[in-house]
Amino acid sequence: MSLPENTTVLIVGAGPAGLTAALSLIYHGCRDFVIADATAEGQHVSRAYSINSATIEALASIDATDGLLSQAIKAKSIRIASRSSQIFEAKFDPLKRYSAHPYPLVTPQNVTEHVLGQKLQSLGVQVQRPHRVVGMKQSEKDPRITDVSFDGGQVIKARYVIGADGARSIIRTIAGIGFSDPEGPSLVNPNVTFEPEPVGPLTLEGHLNGTISSNSFFMLIPFGNRFNTELIRDGKLTTKSVFRIDQLVWSTRFRTHSAIADRIFTRLGAAIFLVGDAAHIHSPAGGQGMNLAIRDAIFLAEVVTKHIQASAENPDVG
């Protein structure tokens, strides 16, 4: 798919942060943008699995929750146990006093991306794939514009660039923004099925289960059969209930560390912004990475739109 030569806003990366940035731009009145991603298609793996209440509220503020609410599992509680007994169970019902969405939504990240992508398509916007950024430089003709080069030789002139391209962000690297990335212990994050399939309270849909010991933490999140179509193994569908441990559907290893960019804004002609993992990384154990990425994108896109509108009324606005 060919790229346009000019755009007001260029979003690099079409994960949850990039897709949400695009939806937020549209909601706040900006349609002059391009969203590009280096991969030929979205993910088929779960990675992040939970959208918390504050994030659902943020998505609702830009009218982007319907598909997620209809497809995801509304979590009821989280149980923490030792290997011999339950320590406590925290139910989410008390959140009704504070939120219209008193629950986390349990859904694999690829399903979240698919739903947000469908919403974007319904609004007439297509992710441009596969287009990998290979360079950025200030325009020689306009000091407020950045020429963004792609691996196919195409160049987009943009006034704003939103780097939503993950922990190894090429936008962050080219912009010269430092990134504190300390080493940390690792955590394995798989989707699995069991043989025979387990029964009992740990398998109940909507309940998150954590088991702790002196040197480990084990989290079991039942997906049931709800996401079997989206979670594939070696290109084949699985028919068994999927859990988050017979059959390994998908697995990855994370370092459970935190990292942060030196800054999330700079100029290289255009205003360059970082959102999500490009700006900050969190241990998956805390469930904050995708949630903060989505909220970053929603709030940043609103600010960018306001700046676009203000500068249209007053060209002296920086």
Image (cartoon, grey):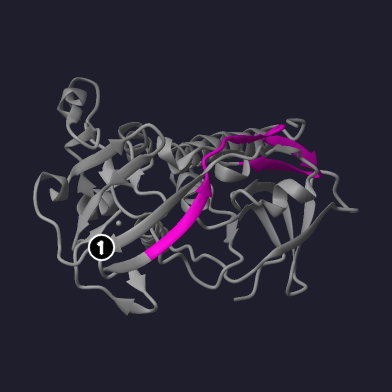
Residue found farthest to the left? 200
Q: Residue at x 71, y 50 (%)?
A: 171
Question: Which stretch is magenta?
Answer: 250-274
Residue found farthest to the right? 140
What is the three-letter code of the residue carrying label 1? Phe
Residue 145 included in the magenta stretch of the image: no
Look at the image and tell me whether residue 182 can be seen: yes
Question: Where is residue 76 shown, x and y percent of the image?
Answer: 16, 37
Residue found farthest to the top? 97
Q: Residue at x 67, y 66 (%)?
A: 132
The image quadrant of residue 278 is: top right
Q: Is residue 147 above or below residue 102?
A: below
Q: Is residue 180 left or right of residue 13?
A: right
Residue 270 included in the magenta stretch of the image: yes
Q: Is residue 255 left or right of residue 308?
A: left
Q: Main secondary structure of the magenta part?
A: strand
